[in-house]
Every structure is written in C-alpha cells, then in structure tokens.
Amino acid sequence: MICFLWIGKSYSQTENVKVYPTNWWVGMKWSHVQLMVHSPGLKSTVQDVEIRYPGVQLIKLNRVESSNYLFLDINISAHTKPGIVKIKFNRIHDQPLWVNYELKSKSKEDGKTRVLGVTSKDLVYLLMPDRFSNGDTTNDFYADMRDTDHNRKNPYDRHGGDLQGVINHLDYLKNLGITTIWMTPVNENDMARTNEGGASRSTYHGYAITDQYNVDKRFGGNALYKKMVDASHTSGLKVIQDAVYNHVGINHWFIRDMPMKDWVNQWPQYTNTSYRDNPLVDPYASNYDKEISVNGWFTPFMPDLNQRNPYVSNFLIQYAIWATEEFGIDGWRVDTYFYSDSLFLNRINDALIKDFPKLTVFGEVWVHTVMNSAYFCQNNFNVPFKHNLQGVTDFPLLFAMFDGLNQPFGWTEGVNRVYTTLAQDIAYKDPNRNCIFFDNHDLDRFYSMVGEDFAKYKMGINWLLTLRGIPEIYYGTEILMKNFKSPNDAAVREDFPGGWPGDKINKFLSEERTEKENDAFNYVSKLAHFRQSSSAITEGRLMQYLPINGLYIYFRYDSKQTIMVISNTGKDSMKPEWNHYSERLKRCTQMRNVITNEILPLNSFEIRPKESFVFELIK
C-alpha cells in the first residue's frame, strides 16, 4: 500500500510558463476567471503582476504553498473586446516577464448548431476511441510518451483507434439511426503502465487524465477533435464528452508538482474508497463512512482530487466551460459522479448551464435502488441536500430490464421488476433525462447477458428504444458483439472488426456481416429510424399496465400518435384481453408493426413466448 505525500519538486516542461485556462472568451457568464500560472520558481521571483487591458481587471494575486505557482483572479467586464491581454510579471532580480493571454469571441452558434443538448429525442452510441477504428496509423504511439506499447494482440495494450477512425464512420452511425456520439475520455493519458491483477496495463480507456487541456495525440490531438465534433454536427450528429472530476492519473503534471498539500485528499496511509453510495444517502450514516466513500482513492494510480479546495474546484469548472466552448460539444457524461464533493458538483453544473442553457449533463451513478439513483439528481424528495444534476445513468432500470428478460415471472420477479421500477419514477423530477442502457465499457455485453438468445435481444432493443429516457447503445451491440468481463474488462472492449487496415472482416459493411448480424443491425436501424420520426416515443407520455402472467404491455402516446409495445415473457402463448387496455386503445381495431409495416387486427392477435412487438395503433 502507498501513502501519497506532498511533492514539492519542479516538473520540467517544454515551455517555461504555462497558463490555465489556456485562453478565455468575452461575453461569458463565468467572467471572474482564475488563472493558474505554472513555472519553476515563479512565486519567489515575482514581486507583483500588472494587467493593462480595457475591461480586464486583476482582482487578486494569490501565492500558494508551492514556489512554482501563482493564481491570478481576473474579472472580464461585459464590454470587453476580444484581443491579446498582456500580463506583466514584475520580477525581483530580472527583467519583467510578459505573458500573452488571448480573449476570443464566444461563438454565436451556441445553442443553434452546436452545444445543442441531448434529449429523449436522441439515440446515443458509446464507443471507446482506442477500440473503434484506426483512421491514422501514424499516431499509434509516440516515443516521448511514457507508454509506447501498442499491440492489438495484447488486450491490455493500446490498439491504435483514434478520432479519424470515428470521422471515417459517421455515415455508418447515421445509417444505424444514431443521433449522438459519446466517447470515453479523449484527454491526454500520458501514464506509465499500471499493474492491476498481476497484469501490466495501458490506460487506453482514458480515465487517468494527465492534462485536461490536451486531447491525447494518439487520438489525434485538439485540432482533430475539433474537426471530429464539427464533422459530426455537419452530419446531424451530436457529441457527448466524458468528464472525470473525481480523480486524475498519478502522472498528471499538477500531481507530480502539486500547488499545495491539499490539492488531493490526503490520508496517513493509502486509503481506497469503499465504492459505496449508501453512506451519502443514509440518514444514520457515520461521518467516517461518508469520508471513505468520497475522499478515498479510486485506485492507487488515480489520485483523488480535493474539490473542497477552491483552487481545485475553479480549475475543474473552468476546464469544463472551456472545453464546451472550445469544441462545441453538446453534453457531458460525468464519470464516478457521487465520489466527488456534493457542493462542488452543484457548483459546476450550475456554472455550465448558466453559460450553455441547452447543455445536457448526466452523471454515472452506479447504484441499485431508484431512491439512491434519484437522490443524486433533481428529485422530488424533501431532503437536507438537493442535487441539481439533470439526470443519471439509470442502473436500477438496467438491472430491472435484465430481470425482465431472464427471470421467470413472479409477484416481484421477472418483468414485474420493470413495471415496479418504472412505477418509482415519481422520485425523479424528470426521468426522461436519465440515460438508459444495457451495456457499456464496464459491463458484460448485452447479447451475452441474454444467453445469445436473439428473441430476447429483440425484446430488449424494443424496450431500450421505446421507454422513457435517453437510450444508449454500446459499440458493437448492433452486430451482436458479445463477452462477459472475464477475466477482466478488456473482454468487453474488443476492437470493432473492420476498424483497422488489414482486418480480414469488415463488420461496417453489410456484405461482410453474417445473416444474424445483419438481422440485428437492421432491426436496430429500423426501430431507431422510426423512433426519430415518432413524437409519441420521443416526446410523449408513458402508460404501463400491470403484467399478467408475463405479458407486459405499455404505451407511448401524445395527441398525434399512440405506440403500443407488447412483450410475452411468460411460458405460454397468449391472446391479450383488449378490454383491459381500452383506456389507450380508444376503439382502435388495427395496428401496424413498425418493423415490417404489416397491418394486423387486434381481435385475432396472439403472441408467443419471448415474442415482442412495437405497434403503431391505427385509428
């Protein structure tokens, strides 16, 4: 076990002075900006600082523990013009040091063609850049980075996927019916290899960030990320960026040279988080358990940031605002959400929405009950602390849907778990802002979880694409990629076949997929495209009926359209008692299968075990 201690030595950099944020914009609501200035010996050599630029005022010069940092609090007035702000550092025994700091114009397209937000109208595609497609083999590794290994035969190595590979397959995603791309973090992970479970591993996943302001050059760097976001918007696709507030990689430059001792959560000896959310919700919880949950480290190589420190808090908030404006992303998914300080989380969410009112933010809240899930976002509880997060990754619904697909029907088992979980939506302020899903980079793959049963697969896709919330599909689910997390996560993070030059099979092409893979792709695509045009599914209300012997029927409806989803999770074929559903049927006698376009009469309809259909009612 290690104990992380205060490190005071300098961390050499290519340039002598670094300033973060690297630039800012005029016309922002966040106009009181705190500049972190980093340079060896800076504090001891600088007597004072001057800024002379119309509309920009230096409020305070902050000297902290480390001799290598100064923090400048500046205010940018509403009438400030774009330009280069010259910051003068008056040194004690040397000539003044001048730093140019750029103020840009805020984009007039925010909320129009970019920073659009992600809603229940969208379908999200989650991909890992390193494992999706290698569009540029020249950036696979760099000799000046700590980890130079790149070997597709090793599941723990980097495989070379990049942002150009994503750009190359935007048409594939459009054809599938996707409207939004969410990638695991693209920020620089210049990490030495880690040892987990006895294996040497790369941080190809992106969650051990070493520089927020740089997109990892193995993915293509900042310019290509900007190009990828712009190309996505031009194609009618939105982009969600993955945020990590709780921790960084241990090789991060501000960990190797910390501004102050409490930049991270310190312990007498290494202390891991319990990974438990319960103490944060439990009215009887001890402060000890709460502190372990929030301030314990996620892993020994991911230092836990102390967001109660205002300098840390400002750094993280300003980066989130900076990245939203710099790249024009449409939303944020926040990793390890409840492990961060609650006051900080509300502060960063509030700051983002003030500057970008349409922006979407949802957090990874890996919990098992609806109450705990709702606690960490906007909810209808009367509790001492209220979170302002818009929505969460809906794990309780995930677990319920798998029970509905795999468990025998019972009073509280099987598909009744789906019904009872949705019945608790009263806890959420707006459950439509939750992200719903079957799998991701941390979970067993969906097709494996249903026993590679294609009937169950289709039933699950029906639920995912028609229930309330923002649906997410993990890359490869549409072509039946499978695996359990055995022996580890790498098993569910395999390369997309055809994403690399020289791949023997290219699953991006229909002619190279198997018949069943094409059946899966086409099923997802047809329902996804129908979903895009369905006001009832994307904007309408949900009405569900108590399951009867495993028969589960619910409706999505508005004034223009009524959609009925019917699934038989029982053991016997059934003819629904349509009079039970007359409230929504409203004397309709026919229905159209949205996949096949077949029109069927209700009165003679019979559904067999494991069948599931999405019907549009015909008036």
Image (cartoon, rainbow, N blue to C red):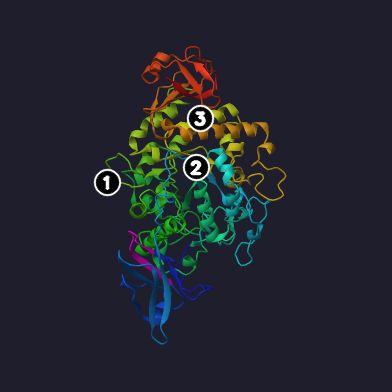
Of labels 1 and 3, the one closer to you? 3
Q: Residues within 10 Å of mark 1 (few under 14, many from 20)?
A: few
Q: Closer to the camera: disc 3 or disc 2?
A: 2
Q: Which amino acid does label 1 sit on?
A: Pro
The image shows residue 474, relative to residue 197, as above or below, that is: above
- Residue 462, numbered circle: 3
Is residue 163 left or right of 313 when viewed as pictured?
right
Toward the top, the furthest residue is: 604
Residue 50 image point, x, y percent? 34, 78
Q: What element carries label 2?
A: loop
Q: Nearer the viewer, residue 399 or 122?
A: 122
User: How many residues crowd around disc 3 within 10 Å: few (fewer than 14), some, or many (20 or more)?
Assistant: many
Residue placed under numbered mark 2 in the picture:
179
Q: Is mark 1 on a helix, strand or loop?
A: loop
Q: In the rendered image, is residue 549 in sight?
A: no
User: Of 540 and 188, which appears nearest the observer?
Assistant: 540
Write the residue at 36% across / 19% down: 583
- Tell me the amino acid under the disc marked 3: Asn
Numbered circles on residues, count: 3
**Quarter holding the C terminus?**
top left
Magenta part of the chain = 25-37
Residues tagged 2 and 1 counted as in contact (Cβ below 8 A):
no
* Element type where label 3 sits in the image: helix
Q: Which mark is residue 384?
A: 1
Among numbered discs 3 and 2, the one appearing first in the sequence: 2
Q: Which of 163 and 418 is in front in this view?
A: 163
Gap between marks 3 and 2, in whole Å? 18 Å
Magenta stretch, main secondary structure, is strand
**Image depth: mark 2 or mark 1 in front:** 2
What amino acid does circle 2 point to? Thr
Q: Position of residue 495 (x, y in %)?
A: 63, 47
